[in-house]
Image: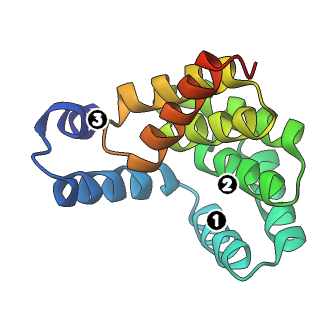
């Protein structure tokens, strides 16, 4: 995993290479020695993609109760909370994911997005900068960072 993060930061020559590395990292985050939990996370992700937010939340909550160190389940739980408009719960779940792996660029991007949505541009900028330090290839995060910096310069916070 350390090798992949190093490649993502310093070895990717283009966005296509970076996407392949990102996808490998995401797959490793989903891995679990418990086959049942690994299957459940896929089911939860399918529910999330189908807009079945309550079901997805139940699934991810069950997973983190069974294995509190399953970082990707915390990250997906954060995503569902965000999609349900539950920003505080989303940030709490994202922070749990970051306790497990401080390099979870998805959790950092999510926190940045919530802080930006809440007009907390300093906090959003901080989260986005941490995210880009880990994964410099996230153009959406880079764009959001620029907006936050611009808003701060104009005194919007």
| Residue 37, horizontal then vertical, whole percent | 65, 62
Identify the residue shown where x is 76% and y is 41%. 117
Does residue 87 lie above or below 126 as drawn?
below
Residue 40 shown left or right of residue 8 in the figure? right
Does the residue at mark 2 contact the one at mark 1 (Cβ under 8 Å)? yes
Q: Secondary structure at mark 2?
A: helix
> On the rendered structure, is 11 left or right of 39?
left
Q: Judge by depth and name the residue closer to the eye, 148 or 83.
A: 148
Q: Position of residue 72 (x, y in %)?
A: 59, 49
Q: Which residue is mark 2?
A: 76
Please tell me how crowded label 3 is: few (under 14), some (14-19), or many (20+) other residues with Cα within 10 Å: some
Q: Nearer the viewer, residue 63 or 15?
A: 15
- In space, the residues marked 2 and 1 are separated at their CA atoms by 9 Å
- For residue 41, which numbered disc appears in the image? 1
Q: Position of residue 109 (x, y in %)?
A: 56, 39
Q: Residue at x 24, y 33 (%)?
A: 9
Determine the image quadrant of residue 67: top right
Distance from Cα at disc 3 to Cα at disc 2: 20 Å
**Badge 2 or badge 1: first in the primary sequence:** 1
Image quadrant for the N terminus? Answer: top left
Which comes sooner in the sequence, label 3 or label 2? 3
Which quadrant: the C terminus?
top right
The first of marks 1 and 3 along the sequence is 3
């Amino acid at each position: 995993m350390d090798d992949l993060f190093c490649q993502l930061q310093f070895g990717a020559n283009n966005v296509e290479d970076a996407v392949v590395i990102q996808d490998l990292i995401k797959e490793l985050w989903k891995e679990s020695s418990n086959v049942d939990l690994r299957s459940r996370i896929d089911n939860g992700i399918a529910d999330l993609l189908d807009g079945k937010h309550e079901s997805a939340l139940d699934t991810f909550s069950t997973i983190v109760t069974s294995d509190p160190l399953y970082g990707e389940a915390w990250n997906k739980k954060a995503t569902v909370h965000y999609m349900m408009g539950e920003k505080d719960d989303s940030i709490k779940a994202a922070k749990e994911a970051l306790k497990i792996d401080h390099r979870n660029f998805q959790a950092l991007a999510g926190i940045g997005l919530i802080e930006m949505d809440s007009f907390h541009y300093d906090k959003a900028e901080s989260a986005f900068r941490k995210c880009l330090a880990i994964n410099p290839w996230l153009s959406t995060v880079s764009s959001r960072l620029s907006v936050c910096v611009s808003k701060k310069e104009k005194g919007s916070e």
